[in-house]
Amino acid sequence: MSKPDLSIIIISYNTLQITKDCLNSIDKSLTKTKFKVEVIVIDNDSKDGSVNMLQSYKPKNFELQLISNRENSGFGRANNQGVRVAKSEYIFFLNSDIVVLEDAIEKLYNFYKQNENTINFLGGKLLNKDMTPQPSSAPFYSLSVVFAALFLRGDYWGLTRNSPNTIKETDWVSGACIIAKKEYFNRISGFDERVFMYMDEVDLLYRAKKKGMSVYFYPEARFIHLGSASSKGKKTYPILQVFNGLMFFYEKHHSKTKQFILKIMLKLKALIGLAIGQIINDEYLKETYGKAYQMVKLVG
């Protein structure tokens, strides 16, 4: 295969069937596509037979490259690894729990190429399994946005994440679906590998904005995003990682005063969740928010 026009990077971790469904949807989406595509799958030491499946997978419309890690290196580090081996100057980060609809890859790629001088990072429209819009465009996590997310059901009211129906400049888009030129990605040194999972894209695109780069949302390219696939649907781990991610983001980018206020809000959220868990005797709430409360250190 000659140099591909687009390199798609997918991280795999114990999601055998979901990853296979993702690859099948990519293959189908590219049936009539004229440009050449390579798909790089980084497997983070899966134990469910994913590697054997990937080794035997034979796509019709793209070239597949598999990299098998000997440990779970996390989302950011594995994506950086994929970028280093990508042969195209255009890279497309795609979660393994994505199902590509129709010709969404071609639409996203063509729109990006036509506007690459004004758009540095571009996200597509994510949908839930039932085809309802999934919030995937958002403002950065200022203290007011964090408050809305924690206490006001911010996504529901469109105060935090949303899903526009028009092309729109935004602060950040979901890391489940982002296309960019490799040079833009490398200019901000890629994903911060200290973030194991969750908030990776927020940090990445915050640094991009600080460098004067733009982020846009493109609703014409549609993808189903199943969500939390590698967490097996258990929400304790994702919630703890979001708490961790917010604290890391504020320690990296904000003042000590704002860090302290953030931690007060996180403590309060954990206390409310813990209290509700005690009242209704919900073991999940008690375990999740008990751990979250212990995690947030107000000093240090």
Image (cartoon, grey):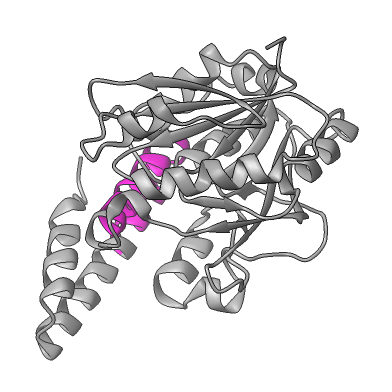
Name the one closer to the observer, 280 or 224: 224
| Residue 126 placement, left or right of 289 | right
Name the one closer to the observer, 58 or 209: 58
| Residue 64 placement, left or right of 287 | right
Residue 31 lies in quadrant: top right
Residue 78, x across and y down, in percent: 40, 26
Name the residue at the bottom extreme: 280
**Residue 19 among magenta residues:** no
Residue 96, x across and y down, in percent: 46, 44
Q: Is residue 175 visible?
A: no
Residue 232 lies in quadrant: bottom left
Name the residue at the right extreme: 114
In percent of the image, x 58 and y 59: which residue is there? 224
Name the one closer to the observer, 261 or 213: 213
In percent of the image, x 46 and y 31: which residue is there? 57
In percent of the image, x 10 and y 75: which residue is there? 283
Q: Is residue 245 visible?
A: yes
User: The C terminus appears in which quarter of the rendering?
Assistant: top left
Name the one closer to the observer, 219 or 97: 97
Is the stretch drawn in magenta largely helix, strand or loop? helix
213 over 239 or under it: above or below: above
In percent of the image, x 68 and y 12: which residue is there? 1
| Residue 274 placement, left or right of 166 | left
| Residue 71 placement, left or right of 196 | left
Count of picture labels: 0
5 over 162 or under it: above or below: above
Residue 243, x across and y down, in percent: 31, 53
Image: magenta residue range: 238-264
